[in-house]
Amino acid sequence: MSFLRDLRGLLDLPQRIEGEVVALRNALAERDKAFAAYREEVDERDKAFAAYREEIDAQLAWLRQTDNVGAIQRLVGVLLRNGKDLPDDIQESALRLQLKIAPDDPQLTRSLVALLHRLGRPPMPDAPLADVPLPSAGRYGGAGDSIDALVASVDGHARDNDLFSAYAALWQTCVRYPDDARGWAEYARCFAERYDWRNCRLAIERAVAIPGVPTPAAAAALLAALCASAEHHRLDDPDWRTWFERLPDPLRVNAHAVRLLVASGDERAAELAPRLLAARPASAASWLAAAMAAFGQERWSDSYHYLWEALSTDLGGTLHTIARDWSAQASAVIAETGKADELADWLSDRHADDPELNLIPACPAPEARLMARRQRSEALDRGLPPFLFVPLGKSASVTVHNLIASGFGLTAVLYSLVDLRVVTSWLRDFQRGGGSFATHLRPLPRNIDLLAAMGVRNVFVHVRDPRQVLISRAEHLHRYTTQLPPIARERLAADPREEVEMTIAADLANTIAWIDGWLKARDKLNVHFTTFEEFIRDHDAFIDRLVALYGGDTRYFDRNLALSQSPAIDFHHRRGEVDEWRRRLDAGQIERVNAQIPDIFWTTFGWSP
């Protein structure tokens, strides 16, 4: 048996040997593959190290000569070739060095402007400007391009929705004409038109720092920026006054100069306005500035006459300026002269000449109207209903309106002449949807009847405890004194403690009547009441309820946008308290005020005596 086993083993030996050989070959093959993979990995490491070394060498070469264009171009090339993102600091250095060689290159300038904008930095050249030699032929058509041509191109770029090219043209203006304040002044105006107040302030500082008398064009641009800043309560640098005082008298005969003086509480506005009208009687801007100056003197009839002339001369431009910047004062003028019905009917008839007359761009920038038109068109395509929001003054009305307007992307569409009168044709257009408007519309019988007759489905009325409204109103007038006629300003300046008593006397009865009027309007309209107190108590619940009441398709509601608050807008924030009045009113005042508040207010809105 042993012999047979040995014999069988001998017979199987070749097969075993062959199997071992195959296994050995497979092992060698696997080893070769592993070695090849290792060699490939080593090669990749060598390549990576070579690329890293090339990148380090390029960075070291640039650090040794940071003003060497060739060195930074080599570094940029290495980074791009290695598939690396270009760091912002390197990209900025490269663009600035290239601009030293080709300072008139529009594309290089635009690229740097875009980068600075993305980084949240001023899209302007550094100041003071170094002497930059310009080549004999520039890429805007020649190094001799006039300053007028460069500035004229700004609005064209803006209308093409290319703001970076607009800023690049202003950059070129500053670089090519460093002794002329116009470049900085036009920058300031450009920023002011877009409510970019931080950069506007910086551009104003640079413009007023340039010595000498500005050219008429530079003065006009800077006055426009100063005027907008003052009217939006963003002019906190006193240096502008020194600049203004050195202006030659003829340069002060300017609509924005008059408005600047009005906004600053300067009595010289009244003296300047007649000269402005005599010099530029065909200018709507002149008439509107004169209306503002007359308001400051409580010359109601004159103010209305000038306002009418401005509207007759340029209806769209004047109306949009009023809606954005002068609505409270215009309301006072129209109310004092009893012209609300007459003017509202005239505006309604004019609507046929310009069907988008009541479409209000968010700012005065050239591209803003196109943006408003596109925004409303998109909202209409989404089937979004109109948001007719009627807030009581000093009830966080801007913030609450923003919840729906920004959350659903609705543009501003007028349906009334400020807070006085519904304009029939405007309301008809407003009812198509896709827009919103917030105004303290008075619940007068004519307004209620017009809203009902036009089939308005929902009116959103936002209210606040009248006692807290008194405090907030007093603080508002203290902060924005130029909204008051001079007599009230003088009384307030003489005794600041008069704020609350003045407000009680002037506003309490009107506030109560306003709320009561909208309560009674429920007989004819579907009025949804919201309160400041519920907004403060539970923001999320308030937003959910308001969105549900509005009825728009919630797929298009962006909560983040609804809660966002642009730094360009004055939201009139203060304390946001619901019962500050308990500390600010004395016992006698509380008793007097409570006695005038109807019982229905306590039960309807949850306020307590």
Image (cartoon, rainbow, N blue to C red):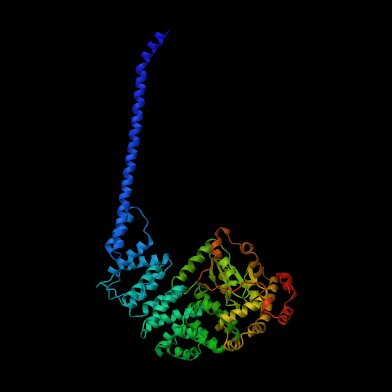
The quadrant where residue 555 appears = bottom right
Who is closer to the viewer here, 559 or 388? Answer: 559
User: Which residue is at 69% across, 78% downward?
Assistant: 512
Position of 513 compared to 333: left or right? Answer: right
The quadrant where residue 187 appears = bottom left
The quadrant where residue 488 appears = bottom right
Who is closer to the viewer here, 79 or 294? Answer: 79
Q: Is residue 236 visible?
A: yes
Residue at the farthest left position: 136
Height in image: 48 above or below 505? above
Q: Is residue 314 visible?
A: no
What x and y, as percent, mark residue 204? 42, 78
What x and y, as percent, mark residue 262? 50, 85
User: Which residue is at 61% across, 73% downward?
Assistant: 575
Position of 77 compared to 571: left or right? Answer: left
Position of 78 compared to 487: left or right? Answer: left
User: Which residue is at 31% across, 62% downward?
Assistant: 63
